[in-house]
Each structure stands twice: as structure tokens, then as C-alpha cells.
Image (cartoon, helix red, strand yellow):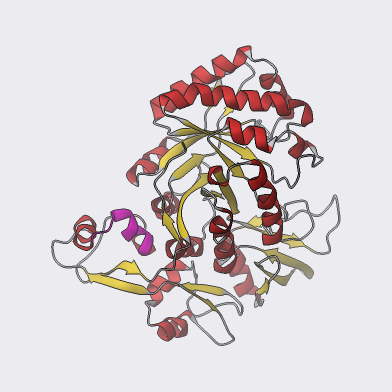
Amino acid sequence: MIIHIVKPGETLYSIAREYGVSVQVLSINNSVTDPQTLAVGQSIAVAIPSVTHTVRAGDTLNSIAAEYGTTLNQLYKSNLLLQGKTDIYEGQTIIVYIEKDPVGSYQLGGYAYPDISEYLLNISLPFMNYLMPFTYGFTLEGELIAPDDESMLRRARVYGTRSVLHLSTLDENQMFSTKNATYILNNPELWETLYDNLLATIQSKGYYALDVDFEFLGKENAPKYVEFIAFLRNKLNPLGYGVIVALAPKVSDDQPGILYEGHDYKALGEAANAVLVMTYEWGYTYGPPLAVSPIPNMRRVLDYAVTRIEPSKIFLGISNYGYDFPLPYVRGESRADSVSTRQAINIAVSTGSEILYDETAMAPYFYYTQDGKPRVVWFEDARSIQAKLELLPVYGLKGALYWNLNRENNQNLTVINSTINRAAASLF
């Protein structure tokens, strides 16, 4: 894969000619709205086909996959224009293989809200070992509060993606409830009730594993949280179900703050089958303008994490979104808007902004003016995603989980296809 940085005067047509690839494929792989109009500094991920097939009468995607010794999902991954569907026509060019330089084989997954479009599910799921519908909650009686996950689970089954039940303390205000977490953790007699309801749902809906995400616990809840995770693992593992636990991005055992003190890395790493290290949100809605996931920050968390947890149990958290920040930043007043990669680039194009790249954070950004007021957008592109995926072999990690799949970023999928060989799904 080649990452081309757009220069003044270039169009997607001129870039396609330069590399001898289809402009239609290039457009879809990079979520380009108008091939004639690009932003200076915009990254374009160019996947170079090594083997193609021209559809003959009677061909199906399954027959093409069999002919070349590949899989249906791999054809979907190399042909985003198929949108995860089997419809093809005579004379159509199908990319069978692309030139790859993979960093290794890893497990991948992603979180998604129930309102995710079928299109985004269809193009994303062939890349994913796991899908985590966001989120199951619970009452103080141990009853589950379920999201509308049925359509997501059906789509996941089509692509052989394993669904993981995500359990959190998110309340009706979409905030992580320290109060609810404290109550359930300190009433172990409710654990059996909650477990019974989790198991019934896992079995009835075909979930593969459980992902527990209790945040803002505080130091007082840390020991009980470890006991709770160990309880769930001891119950679920003998039945063939794994347990993942999400961890705040800590850099030391004694890092202060309600978000960090409730997560004992070493103990939770031992209690669960796998962990997600949430290495994102340095740039956030109410914070100063920053990259969401600066590479130096991610590395500091991983440097600490691998001293407390077996690296092969760690999933790296990867941000699949950005923020549009007002300037100047005013603490307690400023509020950034969350944007997808496609939205960010469209803003740059429509305002004639040049996209810059921070070589330290390894993230793209640009400035623009709206209603006479300056703003700055930090987001993810092919370069920043590749930099994050390249951390997997450096630290010997299990894989990566994306927050979240609701944001269109076909460039991310294109980078995955060129960089990662998908390992078989296995939590223990």
C-alpha cells in the first residue's frame, strides 16, 4: 500500500493514473465525495492489486474465491465497492489479491451503537473478529437492560464475526454511574442474579464472550472489581465463554483520579482472559485541542501495561473519530464536535483548508474559520491508523479494538487490509 499525500492541483483522477489503479476503487477506499476536489495535504491510501479477475457468465463470489484459494471475506476486504454483498456482473473487475506488507496476524474488533447503518456493518464486519454492540446495562436488582442488538447480531453472523456482549454501568443519561457500580460490586449476592441473566442472554442470542466496562470506579471499588471479574471468568470459562475487561489508560500503579484508581492493571489482567487498553481521548469534547490518540501517549500507556499484563492478552484501543475544536480554548466553556474521518476531510475540502500532519503525535489536523471564528480539527487518516497498527508487533499485543465502527472511515479498512493478517478469534 502507498500513502499518497495530495499536492496542489491534484485530483483523484490524476492520482489514479499515477499508480495505474481504478479511480472508482480509489474513491470508495478513501471515502472521497468528489474525485475532482481534494484537500492539499489529504492522505490517499492506494492499494495496488496484484491479482484481478474479470467476472465471467456463471461466476459467483464464492466460485471466484474457490478458484483463487481465498475466502469470500477476503474478496469483500479487497473490494469495498461490493459493500459486503454477493451481487456481481459479467465483465466486472474483482480484486483478488493486493500487494501487502503485513506487520503480522492479529485479532480485530469494533464497538458499534445499534443505530449503525447496514452499509457500515457490511463493509466493516469482514475485517472484524469481534463485534461489540454498545451497550448492555443493568438494574440494581441484577436485571439486564438490553440494546436493540438483533439486526447487528444477524449481520455479524453473515460474515462469521463473533459478537461480544458489552456490559457497562452507563445510565439513562449516558454517563458511567459510579453509584450503580459501587452498589453492584458491594452486594455480591446480586452477582449470581446478574450472571444468570448474562448467561441466558449470551446463550439465547449466540454471543461468544463478555466484555465488562465499568469506569470511574474510584480506589475504594478496585478490589471488588477484581473479584467481580474473576467471578465472571470462573463461571463463564468452563462453558466456553471468554471475559474481556476494559482498562483506563494508566501509566503507573498509583496514577491519581477516579477514572484510574479503580483499575488494578495487574490484578484485572490476571482475572480476565483479555483486556482492552483504552488508549484514546487525550483530545476530547471538553478538553483543549489535541490529537485523540497521540502516539507518544499511547506508547507510555503500553510501556506500563506490558509490565503488569501479559502482552498477548492486550487489545490496543484505536480511535476511529476526531474532534472539531473551537478556538481559543476556554476551560469549562469550550465544547468540541465529534467528527468522522469523512466529515473532517469534507470540512477541509469545503473550506479550502490545507491538512497538516503532526510528526510527534502522528495525527493529521487543519485550521479553518466558521462564522468568523477560528477552529481546528484533529482526526484520523491512513498515516495515523497505520502508525497505531504498527504498535501491535512492537509490544507483542493480541490485537486491536476500534471505538467505534459507526463513523465512516473506509481508509482505515484499506490500511487494515494492507497491514494486518486477521488471526483466528480466540480469547483463551
Extreme-bottom residue of the structure: 9
Up-down relation of residue 18 to residue 243 (above or below): below
Up-down relation of residue 370 to residue 131 (above or below): below
Extreme-top residue of the structure: 189
x, y (%) of residue 81?
A: 36, 64
Residue located 13% across and 65% down the image: 57
Front one among 400 and 133: 400
Q: Is residue 31 left or right of residue 61?
A: right
Dominant SS in magenta: helix
Quadrant in the rendering for residue 374: bottom right
Residue located 49% across and 70% down the image: 32
**In this rendering, does residue 85 appear at all?**
no
Quadrant of the rendering where the N terminus is positioned: bottom left
Quadrant in the rendering for residue 275: top right
x, y (%) of residue 135?
A: 56, 35
Q: Which residues are magenta?
A: 69-78
Q: Is residue 77 magenta?
A: yes
Front one among 422 and 27: 422
Q: Is residue 418 left or right of residue 232?
A: left
x, y (%) of residue 130?
A: 45, 43
Up-down relation of residue 305 to residue 48 (above or below): above
x, y (%) of residue 397?
A: 54, 50
**In this rendering, does residue 72 appear at all?**
yes
